[in-house]
Image: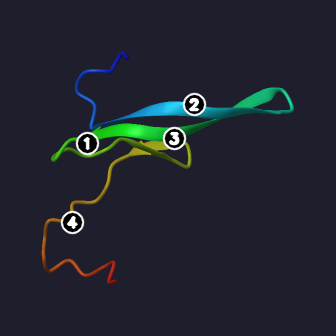
């Protein structure tokens, strides 16, 4: 299976089913193997723009309390 270099994560999945919805096909898959990097920030697309995640390494940052 091909895996892109320098990715933050990847999944190897087994196709379970394919469902035709209109003129699309939805592929249902079951993850069998995964890998993720310990460092790095993902690239996000939100409201038509690319963005990153806020740095949460500051222990005094309490904006998102549990």
Give the residue number, with chain letter if any, for mark 1.
36
Asked which quadrant contains residue 42, the reply is top left
Q: Residue at x 77, y 29 (%)?
A: 24
Q: Quadrant of residue 8 in the image? A: top left
Numbered disc in front, either 4 or 2: 2
Ranked by sequence position, the earlier of labels 1 and 3 is 3
Q: How far is disc 1 from disc 3 in space, using C-alphas?
A: 17 Å
Where does label 2 land, which residue? 15
Does the residue at mark 1 contact the one at mark 2 (Cβ under 8 Å)?
A: no
Q: Is the Cβ of the residue at disc 4 closer than 8 Å to that at disc 2?
A: no
Instruction: Tell me: 53 left or right of 59.
Output: right
How many other residues sit within 10 Å of disc 4, few (<14), some (14-19) or many (≥20)? Answer: few
SS at circle 1: strand
Q: Residue at 28% x, 60% y: name it.
A: 54
Q: Residue at x 20, y 77 (%)?
A: 61
Q: Where 52 falls versus 4 (above or below)?
A: below
Q: Is residue 3 left or right of residue 24?
A: left
Residue 65 appears at what percent x and percent y? 32, 83
Badge 3 density bin: few <14, some 14–19, many ≥20, Cα 10 Å: few
Mark 4 lies on residue? 56
Q: Which residue is mark 3?
A: 30
Mark found first going from the N terminus, 4 or 2: 2
Residue found 36% across the figure and 41% down from its top: 43
SS class of the residue under badge 4? loop
Measure the alpha-carbon separation of dots 4 and 2. Answer: 36 Å
As measured in the structure, the alpha-carbon distance from the residue carrying label 4 to the one carrying label 1 is 18 Å
Image position of 10 with respect to 63: above or below: above
Distance from the alpha carbon under mark 1 to that under mark 2: 21 Å
User: Does label 3 or label 2 sit earlier along the sequence?
Assistant: 2
Q: Nearer the viewer, residue 3 or 39?
A: 3
- Secondary structure at numbered mark 2: strand
Mark closer to the chain start, 4 or 1: 1
């Amino acid at each position: 299976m091909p895996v892109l270099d320098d990715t933050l994560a990847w999944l190897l999945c087994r196709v379970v089913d394919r469902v035709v919805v209109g003129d699309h096909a939805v592929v249902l898959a079951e993850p069998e193997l995964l890998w993720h990097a310990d460092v790095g920030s993902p690239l996000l697309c939100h409201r038509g723009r690319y963005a990153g995640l806020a740095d949460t390494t500051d222990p005094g940052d309490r904006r998102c309390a549990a």
